[in-house]
Image (cartoon, grey):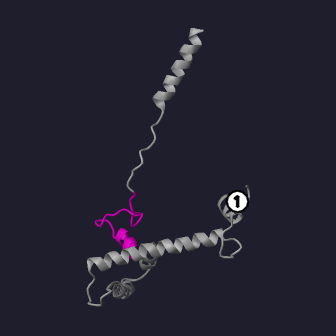
């Protein structure tokens, strides 16, 4: 009778000893990073391009020649310079980066919505959501 109890205790002890503690979650919500790329200006400026232009626009800029890139960047700077004084302030740059991030979010939401609104009526029913998310299994 003692042997099974001893064996049970050793088993429980081994399980408790090898258990992994749950990961600690932060109470503070952090903003999403500006880019998924590593931020290292010594290696490349990809992080800055993603943050400044948005991921999709940065990809199209990578395909341009340096002259075309400068021309398009000049047009963008005109949009960033809200007061039209010929200079971009820190506040204007921050506002532009937030705009680029929000534009990407809205475009992604639109894409997701189209993927779930299977009958294209502008509404997502529970059936459409289940089918788009889990397939026709449920």
Left or right: 129, with 50 as reference point: right
Specify whether residue 54 is in view. no
Image quarter where the C terminus lies is: bottom right
Taking depth in this image into account, of 75 and 123 the one nearest to the observer is 123
Q: Is residue 31 magenta?
A: yes
Left or right: 63, with 67 as reference point: right
Question: For residue 123, which quarter of the picture?
Answer: bottom right
Tag count in the figure?
1
Instruction: Report the residue marked by disc 1.
Output: 135
Q: Position of residue 45 (x, y in %)?
A: 34, 70
Q: Residue at x 57, y 11 (%)?
A: 3
Left or right: 124, with 110 as reference point: right
Q: Residue at x 31, y 80 (%)?
A: 92
Question: For residue 40, which quarter of the picture?
Answer: bottom left
Residue range corresponding to the magenta coloring: 29-52
Question: For residue 81, which quarter of the picture?
Answer: bottom left
């Amino acid at each position: 009778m003692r042997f099974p109890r001893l064996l049970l205790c050793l088993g429980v002890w081994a399980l408790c000893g090898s258990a992994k503690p749950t990961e600690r979650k932060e109470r503070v919500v952090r903003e999403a990073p500006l880019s998924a790329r590593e931020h290292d200006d010594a290696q490349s400026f990809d992080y800055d391009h993603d943050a400044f232009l948005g991921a999709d626009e940065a990809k199209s800029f990578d395909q341009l020649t340096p002259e075309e890139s400068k021309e398009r960047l000049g047009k963008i700077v005109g949009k960033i310079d809200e007061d039209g004084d010929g200079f971009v302030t820190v506040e204007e740059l921050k506002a532009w980066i937030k705009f680029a991030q929000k534009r990407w979010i809205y475009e992604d939401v639109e894409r997701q919505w189209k993927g779930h609104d299977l009958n294209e009526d502008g509404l997502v029913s529970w059936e459409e959501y289940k089918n788009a998310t889990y397939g026709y299994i449920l």
